[in-house]
């Protein structure tokens, strides 16, 4: 909940363009952003200003978070918040940046109630407690390469999914009709992806996307921006519900 003062401050930030030097840096570190049409670019910069101002960027273990890092992360996270009524990740407080892939120990109880500790090397993680964790070398590489992988889009998509309580691949949506269209499109695509994997066909989504509806959704968001034409051709239903939700049509140019 925002007090009056914060709402006013936010409105002012939304109308503040980035200084030229920062805009140039943003376009260099997050080239996806340069594909936005002029009409959306101004709104996008305002959202970047809000994220830079409202979220805390922290380096892990003494790592220094530079302006380029903040711009690369905020610039791409803002692409998911261009729709009318977006609230700019209200539950998210901090973004923790590691220099490179980090090891996370997950405690997993098994069926007998014994706890196993799995160690995973990760390039990003989204926590329900309002934190996104990212490895800078992966962010930097994936922001510049069009290869279907984009750890910033992936983790911020998880953050939006987590916002309504459970990570089930369905973020807050406008109304019942949108929810029904979403479920129908995503369930069909998730099953189709698993079938394709089983038949060892060449797949657009990777194997990790078959892990759960939440992973499938976060991967779909990456593909929506990185391979929009391919996503629209192979999983048109998913493309359409994402386009309606994000109010973007990247297959026709980001606009
Ligand atoms: Zn994930």
Image (cartoon, rainbow, N blue to C red):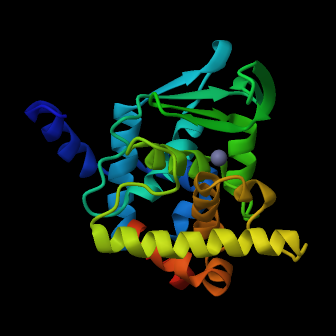
Numbered label tally: 0
Left or right of 208, for residue 220: left
Q: Is residue 92 above or below residue 85?
A: above
Q: Residue at x 57, y 70 (%)?
A: 187
State the image quarter where residue 209 is shown.
bottom right
Q: Is residue 186 above or below residue 140?
A: below
Q: Which of 17 and 193 lies nearest the eye of the viewer?
A: 193
Left or right of 78, for residue 125: right
State the image quarter where residue 192 is shown.
bottom right
Left or right of 110, for residue 248: left
Q: Position of residue 67 (x, y in %)?
A: 54, 34
Q: Position of residue 224 (x, y in %)?
A: 58, 69
Q: Residue at x 29, y 68 (%)?
A: 176
Left or right of 160, for residue 220: right
Q: Check the image and name the residue furthest to the right.
A: 200
Q: Check the image and name the residue furthest to the front.
A: 112
Q: Which of 107 and 85 lies nearest the eye of the viewer?
A: 107
Q: Position of residue 72 (x, y in %)?
A: 57, 45
Q: Position of residue 171 (x, y in %)?
A: 42, 55
User: Does residue 244 appear in this view?
Assistant: no
Q: Residue at x 53, y 47 (%)?
A: 158
Quadrant of the snapshot with the C terminus = bottom left
Q: Residue at x 80, y 32 (%)?
A: 121
């Amino acid at each position: 909940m925002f007090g009056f003062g914060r709402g006013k401050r936010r409105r002012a930030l939304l109308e503040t363009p980035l200084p030229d030097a920062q805009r140039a840096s943003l376009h260099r570190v997050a080239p996806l952003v340069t594909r936005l049409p002029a009409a959306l670019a101004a709104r996008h910069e305002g959202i970047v200003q809000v994220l830079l101002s409202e979220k805390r960027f922290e380096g892990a273990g003494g790592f220094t978070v530079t302006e380029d890092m903040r711009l690369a992360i905020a610039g791409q996270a803002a692409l998911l918040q261009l729709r009318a009524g977006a609230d700019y990740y209200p539950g998210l407080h901090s973004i923790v940046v590691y220099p490179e892939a980090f090891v996370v120990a997950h405690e997993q109880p098994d069926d007998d109630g014994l706890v196993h500790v799995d160690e995973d090397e990760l390039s990003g993680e989204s926590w329900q407690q309002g934190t996104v964790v990212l490895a800078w070398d992966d962010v930097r590489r994936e922001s510049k390469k069009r290869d279907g992988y984009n750890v910033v889009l992936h983790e911020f998509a998880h953050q939006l999914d987590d916002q309504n309580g459970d990570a089930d691949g369905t973020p807050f949506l406008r109304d019942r009709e949108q929810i029904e269209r979403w479920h129908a499109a995503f369930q069909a695509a998730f099953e189709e992806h698993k079938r394709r994997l089983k038949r060892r066909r060449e797949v657009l989504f990777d194997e990790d996307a078959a892990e759960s509806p939440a992973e499938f959704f976060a991967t779909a968001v990456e593909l929506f921006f990185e391979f929009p034409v391919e996503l629209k051709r192979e999983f048109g239903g998913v493309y359409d519900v994402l386009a309606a939700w994000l109010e973007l049509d990247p297959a026709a140019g980001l606009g």
